[in-house]
Amino acid sequence: MPATAAMVANDDPTAAQLAALAEQLSGRGLTRLAVTWVNHAGATLVKVVPATALTAVTRRGVGFSPVSDAFRSDGAIDPEHRLARPDGDLRLVADPASVSPLEPASGWAWAAGMRRYRDGRSYEADQRCFCQRLESRLAADGVSLQAGFELEWMVLGGHDGLQPAVAGGPYGADRLMEALDYATALTEALDAAGLAWEQLHPEYGQGQFELSLAPGSPLQAADRLVLARLLIQRVSRRFGWRCSFSPKPFAEQVGNGGHLHLSVRRHGQPLLEGGEGPGGLGREGTALLAVLLRHLPALLPLACNSAVSYRRLAPGTWSAPFQAWGIENREAALRLIPAEADGASAHLELKVADLSANPYLLLGAVMAVLAEAPADVQESTAWPALPEPVVGDPARSGEAAPPRLPATLAEASQAFAASTLLRRALGDPLHASLIDSQQAEIRRAEGLGDEALLAASRWWPIVGGL
Ligand code: GLU
Ligand code: MG
């Protein structure tokens, strides 16, 4: 029952299909089903049902108050948020196609949920519905995306809980040896959950690790990120440590990214390779990159959703804070990885993203932007306009340096608010309530000095601190 393979049709599974799935769960001793969704603040919320309630939870769902999207990143409810109301109820409905083991040895299964109204209509401000809608919209034009996230996190412990839990240097085999039991437990947990992963390594920062998840459809990629985070948290706790996915846990250390890799095809043909442009881009690939690059400032609060995200975005830390693209350049927000580099299809890395992002919103918004690229560029005689790829360190390019992306959440939120493209794609209820959430996060950070903001955000995604 891997998270990668749809067990039943996404849209309308028959009673027989659901019964077969329930039987499969029970055959594997999976008796509890955790249904999660990710709110505007990027936190994963959950309700648990007995696995025997599978049909009910995929059809009628379980109650969830819309106020949960007014939660700030620390769990407090912002009174000025339009959803900070006690009334109304939604149903969290599990997507049967996403059902997978969570921790099978202890009888836990997992499913991604989406919120609907009681009468079955989709809730306009639901993040996963938005992602699904955009996936279908692109599919109608013959366009499909493969996406995959890389997660970075730090494991911390020691006398004050703030020390790197394992010793060892950047990318160090010494750190792997220090943490081999942890790496074993983590990869076992991923395998047991059927979560396909491609790479694991000690990252540059102290006690920092990185996991690359296998690519899948946008919905699968977002679902896998959610599940992977839960498993990393679970395994870290089993070792008596805590993991921090905060974009910037410590001022003097590099941050944690949540980079998003994307490849794009139209009618099965890869669009980011095989052309005559720089990096092997063809006309359509060039147009896709151009449109993404142009809309990056507006996308930024969806990629970097917390106030502390912007403390990470400093030049020289490979957090890619420039509105630029580059071929294999790790300071460019958009990094093109040509086909020959790793044997995979050519793909783009949205390197600026971090794990405070709601992955469904980020992927949905990226698809909305890609859908704006003109599809008829093949017939046109002019090559689509795209700035030159950055070469070298943009921070040292003097006058020729590309523009910096917004340096604060307030600035990024303004670009998001002004984007008619995103407002149209998200729809007013989602767009406007996201602006409220961004403003709530800005207010939370107001008056906190640098160190206080880092400390108040350090335990993300353990909402509310410790
Ligand atoms: N830790 C860096 C970041 O904040 C990324 C390092 C890398 O994988 O290139 O995104
Ligand atoms: Mg990395």
Image (cartoon, grey):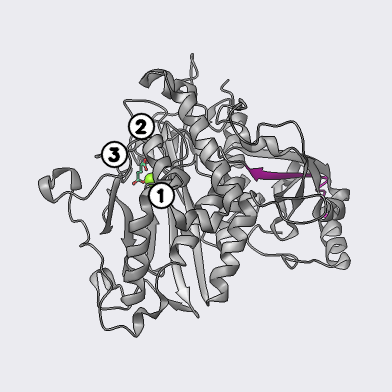
Residue identifier under label 2: 311
Label 1 vs label 3, nearer the camera:
1
Amino acid type for the residue under numbered disc 1: Ala
- Quadrant containing ligand 1: top left
In this rendering, the count of numbered labels is 3
Amino acid type for the residue under numbered disc 3: Thr
The answer to whether any part of residue 102 appears in the image is: yes
Q: Nearer the viewer, residue 209 or 361?
A: 361
Residue identifier under label 1: 298
The magenta region covers 27-38
Q: Marks 3 and 1: in contact by CB < 8 Å?
A: no
Image coords of residue 342 (percent x, y): 36, 64
Residue identifier under label 3: 317
Q: CA distance from mark 2 to mark 1?
A: 18 Å
The answer to whether any part of residue 213 appears in the image is: no
Indicate the quadrant where residue 290 lies: bottom left
Q: CA distance from mark 3 to mark 2?
A: 11 Å
Label 2 vs label 1, nearer the camera:
1
In the rendered structure, does residue 33 fall within the stretch colored magenta?
A: yes
**Where 79 falls versus 422 (above or below)?**
above
